Each structure stands twice: as C-alpha cells, then as structure tokens.
Amino acid sequence: MSFRQRIPIKTAKEIERMRVAGSIAAKILHEVAMAAKPGVTTGDLDALSRELMRQHDCKSAFLGYRGYTGNMCISVNEEVVHGIGGPRRLLPGDIISLDVGVVKSGFIGDNATTVAVGDIPLETKRLLAVTEQSLYEAIKFARAGTKLADLCGAVEEFVKPRGFTIVREFVGHGVGRRLHEEPQVPNYRPQGKSPTLMPGMTLAIEPMVNAGVAGVRILDDGWTVITEDRKPSAHFEHTVLITAGEPEILTDRPRLAEPEMLGLPAW
Ligand code: MF3
Ligand code: CO
C-alpha cells in the first residue's frame, strides 16, 4: 500500500488556515517564552497562554486531548515533554520547554522551544543550541521529492556526534485538522520503506534531546515525561509546509538558541 494515500495533502484554502494557526501559535509561544523568568510559576505561564489564546480567538489544541489538563505543555529541566503547569516557581539555572498548539478555524499550529531561566551551565547551553539546530537541519530536508527518512535521520546525525541522545518513545507527526496525523516523524532514521514528501503535506518536526541517557519514564500524573537519569532535556518544534520550492515554516519566530546568542562558538 502506498503511504501517500494516508498522508493528508492540504488544499490551498486549508494551507491558508494552517498559516494563520501557525502564526498565532508562534506568537503565543514567543510571548510565553519571554515571560519565563526567575520567580514566575509554571502555572502563571499556562494562564498566560490561555489568556493569549483568548485574545487571538483560538483554542488550545492540547487541553482535553486524551484528558490533558494544561493549556500548553511546560517541562522543566529533566522533564522532557508533556509537563503540566502548576505551583512550581522557576529558578535561575533552570531550563524550560514550552509547547503551544492552537486550533483556529479548524486547523492546528504546533510549536515548541526551550529557554534558559537566568544563567545556565555551559553544557546546558550546548544542549539547547544543538537541539534547536537539529530542528533546522531536519527542515532542510522538508522538500517535495525527499524521503521522510532523510529528514528524520538528519536530526540524529546532527545530535549524535555532539554527544547528546535522542528520545525515541515520542515522535513528531503530521498535523492539520487533527493534532496527530500521518506520518510519524521520529528523530532518528526509521527502518524500511519511507514515504516521499509532497507539496501540501504539513509536518510537526520536534526533536527531543537529552544531556545524558536516552531513556525516559512517565511520572505518576500519567503525562510528565522525565529522563531516566534526571539530567536535562530540550525540545524544539515547528510546523512546516512542504511546497514545490523552499520549506515554509508555518510557526516561524525568532530563534533563541543560536550558538552566538548563548556565547558558544559557531558550528
Ligand atoms: N507537541 C506535542 C505533540 O504534538 C504536544 C501534545 S500534548 C498533548 O504531541 F497533551 F496534547 F498530548
Ligand atoms: Co507536536
């Protein structure tokens, strides 16, 4: 069976709605990221995202999804993804992964970033820079005619030689009317036959990278994913449209973890 029948291709009108959803998701994520300062609680950030979604007349794509209770995902330090905002107060030296998905006019934009709270250790700066860049390495392969496996492999092939590990239990995904559509987009090269990317496909590409071991477990809240060794983890995500030409990042926003911005040497 061909993959291409199962991967939704968006029409021009649907793409226009994806652009709107993506740009709102990006704006909200950027604003929440700017508010992640020492002394703020993760619940404050969740409440801010809820207020911004109200202002933009859109809804959280996560709230209520399989019983998820947050408006966005907020994951601190060793938390990988799917953390839920609450009374925890941010401290200098923390890193915080923020994941915002919104529904607008029936279409979803999904994006994530990880930011430093105050000053963080050099090795953690490297973790952020490598994870952000691995997302952009993958996006270079988000082109019509490319094999999905090459896009996925680009993440692993950038991260591995730099000494960090890839989370394998959670993956990126197609996104559109539904949060999770075909295909799955792992952050490592998948085995076997791989679909060819085509114009009109919209993918959420989302590397999750650990400072220590790759293994993860889920906390008793049933959602929060943490690293097995409790070392920090980073997560960056964009919703990307495959076009006849260049990749179009539907959730485009200012980068915050380029090496130069963190005082690290360029690649
Ligand atoms: N960006 C994540 C994903 O696409 C966020 C999902 S959180 C959930 O899987 F609560 F909606 F599951
Ligand atoms: Co996602």
Image (cartoon, rainbow, N blue to C red):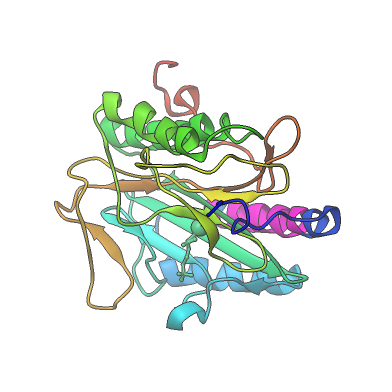
Above/below status of 177 relative to 1: below
Give the quarter of the image for residue 158: top left
Residue 1 location in percent, x, y?
52, 55
Give the quarter of the image for residue 212: top left
Question: Which residue corresponds to the image point at 33% horizontal and 36% vertical from the top-left?
Answer: 127
Q: Is residue 151 magenta?
A: no
Question: Which residue corresponds to the image point at 24% horizontal and 29% vertical from the top-left?
Answer: 163
Question: Which residue corresponds to the image point at 29% horizontal and 63% vertical from the top-left?
Answer: 225
Q: In terms of depth relative to the viewer, which is nearer, 107 or 189? A: 189
Q: Is residue 19 left or right of residue 247?
A: right
Q: Is residue 129 in view from this perspective?
A: no
Q: Is residue 42 left or right of residue 23?
A: left
> Magenta region: which residues?
18-33
Above/below status of 260 relative to 129: above
Residue 255 location in percent, x, y?
57, 36
Q: Main secondary structure of the magenta part?
A: helix
Q: Is residue 13 in view from this perspective?
A: yes
Residue 222 location in percent, x, y?
29, 77
Q: In terms of depth relative to the viewer, which is nearer, 111 or 184? A: 184
**Quadrant where the C terminus is found in the figure:** top left
Looking at this view, name the residue that lies furthest to the left.
229
Q: How many marks?
A: 0
Residue 49 location in percent, x, y?
59, 67
Question: Which residue corresponds to the image point at 51% horizontal and 82% vertical from the top-left?
Answer: 64
Give the quarter of the image for residue 122: top left
Looking at this view, name the residue that lies furthest to the right.
13
Q: Is residue 26 magenta?
A: yes
